[in-house]
Image (cartoon, rainbow, N blue to C red):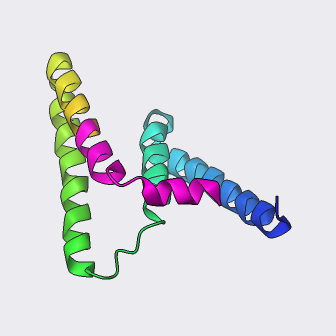
Amino acid sequence: MDKKKVISTTIMFLVIVAAIIGFKSIFGEINTLVGVAGITAALSLLGTDYTITPIKSTIYFIFIEVLLGVGSFLASTNAFLGLVITFAIVFFILYQFTYNTKNLHMLLLH
């Protein structure tokens, strides 16, 4: 493994841990998983250039965030409804961001 890659990976790890600890201290221990999911999502989006259509991309990501918020609100009202909504939203997110795994495959190899 290349020395620069080790250093950049270590720095990225430290930033992730610091962000999770910061999120945990601000929003409480019960919401730590939300912070981890947000950081994971942000890292997975780094491999794609969204500046080609910035307004469309911004609206798209706002829609996804609102969908997550509404889904979590509705899921908290009923356990069965929460199960259905969680599976539906997770399927939607995974489908939207992993249908083209060629770029992800290339990132993992290099």
Residue found at the far right of this picture: 3
- As for residue 85 lying within the magenta part, the answer is no
Q: Is residue 100 visible?
A: yes
Is residue 102 placed above or below 93 in the rendered structure? below
In the rendered view of the protein, which quadrant contains the N terminus? bottom right
Occupied quadrant, residue 71 = top left
Residue 9 location (% of width, % of height): 71, 59
Q: Is residue 52 above or below residue 38?
A: below
In the image, taking residue 100 as reference, residue 76 lies left or right, namely left
Specify whether residue 42 is in view: no
41 w.r.t. 50: above or below: above
Q: Residue sitting at 60 percent across and 48 percent down?
A: 21
Q: Does residue 58 appear left or right of residue 12 in this picture?
A: left
The magenta segment is 91-110
Q: Position of residue 31 (x, y in %)?
A: 43, 38
Residue 63 in which image quadrant: bottom left
Q: Residue 100's spot in the image, x, y percent?
A: 35, 55
Does the magenta run of residues contain 97? yes
Q: Residue at the spot x=52%, y=53% of the render?
A: 105
Q: Quadrant of the C terminus?
A: bottom right
Residue 103 position within the rendered picture, expressed as x and y whole percent measured from the top left: 46, 60
Q: Nearer the viewer, residue 104 or 33?
A: 104
In the image shown, does 82 or 90 lie closer to the viewer?
A: 90
Please identify the dominant SS of the magenta region. Answer: helix
